Image (cartoon, coloured by chain):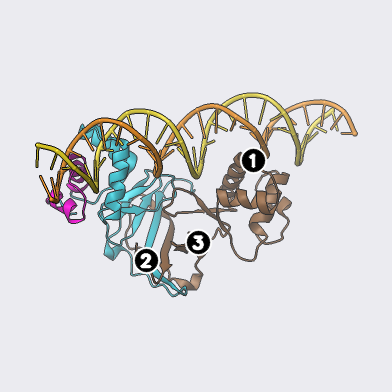
Chain colours: A cyan, B brown, C orange, D yellow
Amino acid sequence: MPKNCNFIEKLREVGLRPTKQRVKMCEVLYNREKTFHFTINDLVKLLSEKMNQKISLATVYNTVHAFEKKGYLKEISIDSHKSYFDTNTSAHHHFFDEDTHELIDCDESDIDKINIRKNITGKKINSVEVLVRVASDNQTQK
Amino acid sequence: MPKNCNFIEKLREVGLRPTKQRVKMCEVLYNREKTFHFTINDLVKLLSEKMNQKISLATVYNTVHAFEKKGYLKEISIDSHKSYFDTNTSAHHHFFDEDTHELIDCDESDIDKINIRKNITGKKINSVEVLVRVASDNQTQK
DNA sequence: AATCTACATTATAATAATTCTAAACTATTG
DNA sequence: CAATAGTTTAGAATTATTATAATGTAGATT
């Protein structure tokens, strides 16, 4: 979703009613310069603290999953027990900072196109994603 | 850990006492032809059903984490809310079958070496892993 | 081989993330 | 502006995991 677009229209386009909770969540998620990586907990905090918007936890879960299903959010796999989401829904790779637990997007140019030589009969490739784990240079490796 | 090796010795080597629970878990995990991918739940089931070994859930968690810390197991990132582990602890890539939720190892030859051009100041790369999601050919894409 | 002690195991309680439920609410349709 | 189908909500339920504290045991010491 582009920044400062008509969120009401964008929600209607995919068959989601533009409730005030959903529109507010769109503003928080998409009105930013860079793509946003977050956990549900991050988002709830942001909504309540920064926007003093009291949206029920269940609604945040519902909405994030609705946005994901409609292609407005993407879930990212990290080995924690939390789900991370990304407002950049295009196929792209990530760095994960193991010190700060922050996700960083990779540009197209950062990693060459991955060539998969393996083929599994009857299965098609849905996505190919690289996760690069980084950590502070001056510390013992995990 | 190699198949049919001296598990008692292997445990002692890394400072873990070879208790009967740990040795039994070694047998279940490492006495196989191919590498084994599992969740804690899979492992508990295997231990109780196939081996009729009643090992407490807490011990399974403790032991899996102990084995991981000592480099005998590796955690794999999948977007589920469960942790997946792999008896193959070398750096390697995976296929994830979204239909069956099964993990499949990639051979060295399946994917070219990944070249990372991005550099984050003060951070070193700990690992680079590719996850290829596959699904049945004749179904609507997720 | 009996004893000691630090490490392990265990059942159970606690916590954390997420999902479910069912009642109250609201955006849209007619 | 009433009907209704989709939403929101608080709170309960569920699931995965970790903590606790009592009991058990491997390996060292006598």
- Is the C-beta separation of discs 1 and 2 under 8 Å? no
| Amino acid residing under circle 1 | Ser
Spot occupied by residue B74 in the image (x, y as percentages of width and height): 53, 54
Q: Which residue is mark 3?
A: B103
Residue B115's image quarter? bottom left
Classify B113 as above or below B101: below
Magenta part, dominant SS: helix
Mark linked to residue B83: none
Give the chain of mark 1.
Answer: B
Magenta stretch contains residue A8: yes
Q: Secondary structure at mark 1?
A: loop
| Amino acid residing under circle 2 | Asn
The magenta region covers A6-32
Q: CA distance from mark 1 to mark 2?
A: 38 Å
| Amino acid residing under circle 3 | Leu
Q: Which residue is mark 2?
A: A126
Using the rendered image, report if marks 1 and 2 lie on a common chain. Answer: no
Classify B95 as above or below A1: below
Q: Which residue is mark 1?
A: B56
Magenta stretch contains residue A15: yes
- Is the C-beta separation of discs 3 and 1 under 8 Å? no
Q: CA distance from mark 3 to mark 1?
A: 26 Å
Give the chain of mark 2.
Answer: A
As drawn, is B32 to the left or to the right of A130?
Answer: right
Q: Residues within 10 Å of mark 1 (few under 14, many from 20)?
A: few
Q: CA distance from mark 3 to mark 2?
A: 15 Å
- Is the C-beta separation of discs 3 and 2 under 8 Å? no
Is any atom of residue A30 visible in this view? yes
Q: Secondary structure at mark 3?
A: strand
Give the chain of mark 3.
Answer: B
Spot occupied by residue B27 in the image (x, y as percentages of width and height): 69, 55
Is any atom of residue A2 visible in this view? no
